Image: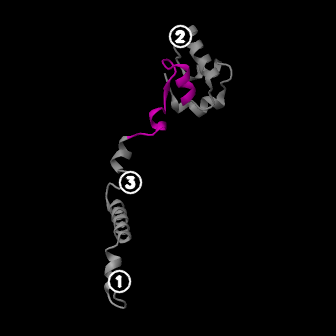
Amino acid sequence: MLKGTNFEFVQRMFSRDFYTSMLVLSVFCLLVASPQGVAAPKAKDQAVKPNAEQVASKVNINKADAETIASVLTGVGLKKAEAIVVYRKQKGKFKSLDELLVIKGIGEGILEKNRAKILL
């Protein structure tokens, strides 16, 4: 082997380790530079998919089941939601939001927190 020449550099350049390193570096550069790279989600996808709050931000208490009512309204668990459904079946549709105050466990505070989320 020739020492002290550029021959060692040429040998290293064509070695298996060199090609492996260059392949890894190339793939990394393609992923980072790509507009559809792994790390960067598309802005179009974010605008199309609404989050869970936007989907279930309101509930019609005259039509919804107890599980839906409980999942949308703050401070209303499954038992209170079931009481709303039972009251609705016995008395008919709610005509005003203030009728909810008749339900045991629903007071002014809970009604005020949820007023914007309730549809009739």
Q: Which residues are magenta?
A: 49-72
| SS of the residue under disc 2 | loop
Position of residue 98 relative to residue 39, above or below, is above
Percent of width and height locating residue 27: 34, 61
Left or right side of 76 for 60? left
**Mark pair 1, 2: CA separation:** 91 Å
Type of amino acid at the residue the image marks with label 3: Val
Tell me the number on the disc at residue 32: none
Q: Name the residue tied to disc 1.
A: 8
- Numbered disc in front, either 1 or 3: 1
Q: Residue at x 31, y 85 (%)?
A: 7
Which residue is denoted by mark 2 in the rendering? 92
How far is disc 2 from disc 3 in space, using C-alphas?
54 Å
Q: Amino acid at mark 1?
A: Glu
In the rendered structure, which disc, 2 or 3, sits on the residue that comes first in sequence? Answer: 3
* Nearer to us in this view, 92 or 28: 28
Q: Amino acid at mark 2?
A: Gly
Q: Which mark is residue 38?
A: 3
As for residue 37 lying within the magenta part, the answer is no
